[in-house]
Image: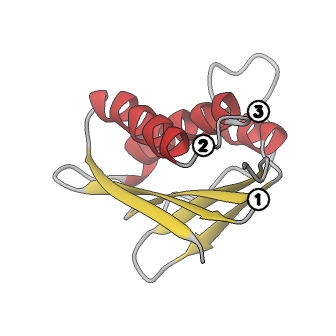
Amino acid sequence: MPSSRQRRFPRSRASVRDARAFVRQALTDWDRLDRLDDVTLCVSELATNALLHGVPPGRQYCVTLTLDGSLLRLAVRDTGDHPAPAAPPAEDACSGRGLHLAREVSDDLGVTGHPVGKTVWVVFKTDAGC
């Protein structure tokens, strides 16, 4: 049976740090630390994107972690309609690399649209644990 944890975060810069701590605690509790750095990087990128492009003032974003066997799914849902960038950024661009980086360190990445907002998710294959 899958394990899942979910938490909402306010629209603030400090919430990215708090999202990383939430993810680290869940992975520690589940004894799934083999992909900790990759998952932490991805939650930083996805939460930052939610803050910059998807969370209007006064709203929150939601981070969900689901562990199903050896698969770990990290999802960040926001209420914005800003689409995920399709093309890699130009070499001299100052931003726009976060989702491309997440795609490289995860085993899968996608975006699910909702009537209001979207969920950006990544999947990681982990050690099955003891």
Residue at the disc numbered 3: 89
Asked which quadrant contains residue 45, the reply is top right
Residue at the disc numbered 2: 31
Taking 109 as reference, is 17 left or right?
left
In whole angstroms, how far apart are the C-alphas of marks 1 and 3?
32 Å
Q: Earlier in the sequence, mark 2 or mark 3?
A: 2
Q: Mark 2 Cα within 10 Å, few/some/many (few <14, many 20+)?
A: few
Checking the image for residue 114, the label placed there is none
| Residue drawn 48% across the image and 65% down it | 4
Nearer to us: label 2 or label 1: 2
In the image, is residue 46 above or below residue 97?
below
Q: Where's the N terminus, which quadrant?
A: bottom right
| Residue drawn 59% across the image and 72% down it | 2
Nearer to us: label 1 or label 3: 1
Q: Amino acid at mark 1?
A: Ser
Q: Where does the image place residue 88, in percent across and percent down from the top left?
A: 81, 38
Q: Amino acid at mark 2?
A: Asp
Mark 1 falls on what kind of element?
A: loop
* Residue 96 visible in the snapshot: no
Residue at the disc numbered 1: 70
In the image, is residue 23 above or below residue 21?
below
